Amino acid sequence: MSESSQATVHRPAGTAGQGARARIALVLVSHSERLAQGAVELAAQMAPGVVLLAAGGRDDGGLGTSYDRVSAAVGEAAADADGVVVIADLGSAVMTVESVIELDDELDGRVRLADAPFVEGAVAAAVTAHGGGSLEEVLMSAEHAGGTFASLDAAVEQAGQERDALAPEPGDLSRTVVLRNPLGLHARPAALLARMIAGFDASVTIDGVNGASVLELMKLGATGGQELTVAAQGPQGSEALAAVVEAIDGGFGEV
Amino acid sequence: MTLDVAWALRWTRLTAQEIARSKAELTELDRQIGDGDHGENLNRGFQAVLAKLDTVDPPEQIGDVLKLVATTLMSSVGGAAGPLYGTAYLRAAKVTGLAELDPHGVVALLEGALEGITARGKASPGEKTMVDAWHPAVDAAEAAAGQGAGTTQVLAAAVAAAREGAEATIPLVATKGRASYLGERSAGHQDPGATSTALILAAALAAVETADPVAATPDE
């Protein structure tokens, strides 16, 4: 019925290859068909290796939530993945998801509804899933996205404290590098870095924040020309450090 | 009067009739404090229930009717009333694996419905939601059954309490659901969900009182 040109499903390009790394799929449920599709599109740009399904609107395409659409999307996602995290926008979408989870016996605890803001939660969860996160990790990532954006002042203050805690220790590898792209560490490069870092067996901080967290990186608000301190530790610390520095120095293809 | 599967079917058809007749009124109530779609949504749901009843084999048990209503409402309503009433009918169906309801069966059905709505919507009495009609209805039904009333009187007690409960939502300030976004401005309007609850329960009573004479004839 919905002959929309926008995708309702995002699947990794090479499902059998590297894209299969994400074990957790996401279902995004909105009152609006287009809002759900837009959220899938946005999250897919940041996390191309994750199966993302939109379940928005009523069966006739109007505003609302459809039990059948949600049920079909959740079933399809669960068939392919170890687990499914669902993010929903408003009251009836949340209640419809809960009904689906309660009524479908085959889902068997592998589907969880995140108590998360729709867009921020979807992006954070998708990036964590892309990095190979477990059901619990992807869920937590979505749920913590709310606090990250809800009170930015508090978050910045907290980030300052965490920064002290994450300050490079003796033995850490560390380098400084200048952000060369004019727009700085906006969403796309932040996601790119976070994904890259998650792929190494290493712990990397950028200006003191967790480099594997796309939201932490975006919160830095780092702009073009700014100098960043990258520190790494762990078995693949030096490889991770080199890759991150190279990506930043390369301007993320934007220079 | 017997509360059997024929009663459950009459209840369902009368509910659909009543919701269709009150569609504009419910939508108007919802326009004042919500998003103005309660009447349309619920009517779409119950019309879908009628259509479904015409295509399936005749249900054999009360619980089958309730389950059919539950799944159809969830699939077709589109608003919060879908999962809320859907879960209510579903939980009501779980407790009525009986061919006929006695007064305690009526109470169990209503309790199941209330439990479903609170599980799904997480509202408590006094928050200006459909719980404000369901809660007093269950209390009144329990009290009536405890005093030895018959099925019809138990239902009548529930209907009277649901109507009073719905009217009592007028001065309340909403703290759950879409109306809670309005804060103080939600006071002065009757809650649409509590209103539709009273309609649904009134149809259950009417379905007893308008018992189809053919269905009521005992087997020879």
Image (tube, rainbow, N blue to C red):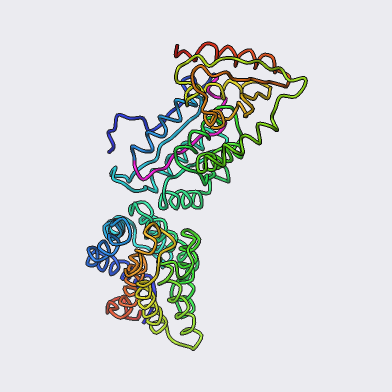
Where does the image place residue A235, in percent across and percent down from the top left? 73, 19
Instruction: Classify B8 as above or below A90.
Output: below
Instruction: Classify A131 as above or below A77.
Output: above
The total number of labels drawn is 0
Quadrant of the snapshot with the C terminus of chain B = bottom left
Where does the image place residue A21, in percent across and percent down from the top left? 57, 25
The magenta segment is A18-32
Is residue A114 rendered magenta in the image?
A: no
Where does the image place residue B21, in percent across and percent down from the top left? 22, 67
Quadrant of the snapshot with the N terminus of chain B = bottom left
At 36% across and 38% down in the image, what residue appears? A35
Is residue A30 left or right of A239 when viewed as pictured? Answer: left
Q: Nearer the viewer, residue A243 or A49?
A: A243
Is residue A31 rendered magenta in the image?
A: yes
Q: Nearer the viewer, residue A152 or A203?
A: A152
At 68% across and 20% down in the image, what residue appears? A232
Is residue A10 left or right of A80 when viewed as pictured? Answer: left
